[in-house]
């Protein structure tokens, strides 16, 4: 099962704390990246003994463990997260402060700026010319960087690049399409939120008095965070809705500080203990792995890996799932004899009338071990024991169209991608070139063992 904390995660054990308190190109790449999250003591994680405070040239550097109110937070194009305060920044979730101009020289050297009001990383895949570029804001100016280099023509007036957006901002954060209705940027000034549509270059202003005044904001793994003082509040970027458990102290989650954090020291999961419940890739290319009551999104690995409770994304599904598959912008979660269907978006909503029984929805009965659907196809392959049962999702009513034996038993999860079908069984997986190869096979292929080289687990 998943550990409750991922080594590359900035949210230091938030899932474990909450539990206590209250696509891709190949399967080898899927699995290799997934289990990096189990290596909780690897170098990418938060340090055991942080030393943020130090002295540079006789001047004490700021220490974020003292409870700093950040000026801005943004990831770069490589997934590194920068925290800004005055003329200094912190790269990542550990380590001491550095001068900002060591990475972005114009922030002090040429333009004598020394600090920023707001920053964000642009999400605009339809325009590669500015996708993944970092934008900094100061007073009425905007600076655009890529690969730590200031782009030609910058700084500019904010109105040149973002018409309708006010000056002297408090915070800014990107909101990709699917999490917002369109690729957008949220600009904060007091309790006003100016939602800028990247494509139409129009602004809609909202007022969210229930959300604290943000001094910085951060987007990470389909979640949006407003930072205020040394606290943060997770919010819905469309409605501004805030969960009841917020605010929380950032020192517990976004950095490693003495006397803060949850869960203590962790060891990497042994490869022999790996066990998945389900895996799926939706039409937008988002890949999710499920184990126990948690899930993890894999395709955002550039920015880090972290497990979350299934109820965070699919709130009506408690505990573990038996199988998951995606079809026509919908996610099907099978638990016991029930099928839950959600609109496949960041803020998933259960379709009215669900859950329904397996018999009502798919025309089958009994325990489901795994299910998979290949890209562009309309037949879901459902594994029950040593049988593979095909169901045509275009038919009404739905019923089994083919029922064939499977040369394997006790399958945990399955996924079909461009390179074929992979069936997971504990710490091993079996590869087939296609569903036809799987269905026609009478002998199981060689079982490939999960290794530390593949997944970062312990041999």
Image (cartoon, rainbow, N blue to C red):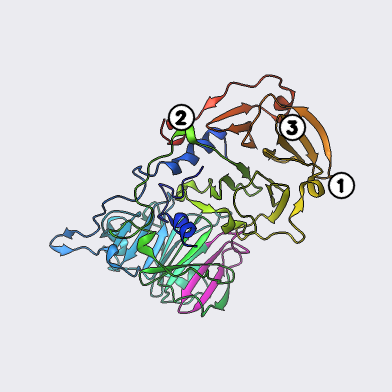
C-alpha span from label 3 to label 2: 28 Å
- Residue at 79 percent of width and 49 percent of height: 361
User: Residue 451: which numbered mark, if any?
Assistant: 2
What residue would you read off at disc 1?
A: 397
Q: CA distance from mark 1 to mark 2?
A: 44 Å
SS of the residue under disc 2: loop
Q: Is residue 379 above or below residue 300?
A: above
Residue 401 appears at what percent x and percent y? 83, 35
Which residue appears at 77% of the width and 53% of the height? 356
Q: Eyeballing the image, is 362 above or below 90?
A: above
* Residue furthest left in the image: 58
Region of the chain picked out in magenta, as a range: 175-201
Where, by quadrant of the figure, is residue 85 drawn?
bottom left
What residue is shown with label 3? 388
**Which of the two residues, 344 or 451, is positioned nearer the viewer here?**
451
Q: Earlier in the sequence, mark 1 or mark 3?
A: 3
**Residue 197 painted magenta:** yes
261 on left or right of 446:
left
Circles 3 and 2, Cβ within 8 Å, touching? The answer is no
Does the image show residue 328? no
Asked whether 225 falls inside the magenta stretch, the response is no
Residue drawn at 71 percent across, 29 percent down? 386
Count of labels in the image:
3
Is residue 434 found left or right of 297 in the rendered image?
A: right
- Residue occupying the point 58% across, 32% down: 425
């Amino acid at each position: 099962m998943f550990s409750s904390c991922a080594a590359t995660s900035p949210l230091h054990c938030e899932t474990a704390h909450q539990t206590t308190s209250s696509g891709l190109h190949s399967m080898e790449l899927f699995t290799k990246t997934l289990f990096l999250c189990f290596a909780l003591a690897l170098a990418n994680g938060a340090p055991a003994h942080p030393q943020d405070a130090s002295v540079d040239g006789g001047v004490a550097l700021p220490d974020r463990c003292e409870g700093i109110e950040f000026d801005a937070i943004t990831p770069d194009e490589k997934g590194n997260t920068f925290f800004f305060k005055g003329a200094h920044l912190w790269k990542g979730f550990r380590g001491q402060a550095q001068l900002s101009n060591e990475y972005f020289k114009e922030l002090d050297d040429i333009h004598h700026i020394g600090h920023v009001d707001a920053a964000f990383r642009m999400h605009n895949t339809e325009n590669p010319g500015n996708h993944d570029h970092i934008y900094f804001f100061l007073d009425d100016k905007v600076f655009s960087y890529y690969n730590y280099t200031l782009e030609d023509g910058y700084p500019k007036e904010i109105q040149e690049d973002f018409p309708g957006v006010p000056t002297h901002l408090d915070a800014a954060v990107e909101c990709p399409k699917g999490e917002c209705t369109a690729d957008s940027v949220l600009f904060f000034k007091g309790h006003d939120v100016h939602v800028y549509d990247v494509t139409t270059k129009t602004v809609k202003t909202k007022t969210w008095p229930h959300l604290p005044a943000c001094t910085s904001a951060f987007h990470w793994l389909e979640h949006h965070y407003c930072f205020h003082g040394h606290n943060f509040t997770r919010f819905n970027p469309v409605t501004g809705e805030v969960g009841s458990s917020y605010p929380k102290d950032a020192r517990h989650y976004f950095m490693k500080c003495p006397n803060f954090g949850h869960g203590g020291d962790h060891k990497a999961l042994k490869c022999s203990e790996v066990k998945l419940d389900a895996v799926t890739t939706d039409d937008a290319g988002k890949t999710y792995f499920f184990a126990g009551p948690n899930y993890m999104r894999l395709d955002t690995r550039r920015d880090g890996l972290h497990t979350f409770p299934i109820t965070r994304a699919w709130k009506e599904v408690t505990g573990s799932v038996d199988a998951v598959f995606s079809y026509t912008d919908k996610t099907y979660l099978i638990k016991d004899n029930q099928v839950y269907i959600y609109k496949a978006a960041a803020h998933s909503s259960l379709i009215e009338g669900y859950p329904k029984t397996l018999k009502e929805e798919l025309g089958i009965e009994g325990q489901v071990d795994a299910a998979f659907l290949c890209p562009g196809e309309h037949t879901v392959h459902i594994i029950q024991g040593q049988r593979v049962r095909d169901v045509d999702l275009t038919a009404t009513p739905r019923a089994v169209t083919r029922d064939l034996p499977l040369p394997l038993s006790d399958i945990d999860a399955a996924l079909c991608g461009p390179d074929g079908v992979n069936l997971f069984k504990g710490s091993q997986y079996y590869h087939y070139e296609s569903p036809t190869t799987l269905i026609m096979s009478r002998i199981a292929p060689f079982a490939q063992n999960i290794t530390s080289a593949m997944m970062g687990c312990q041999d």
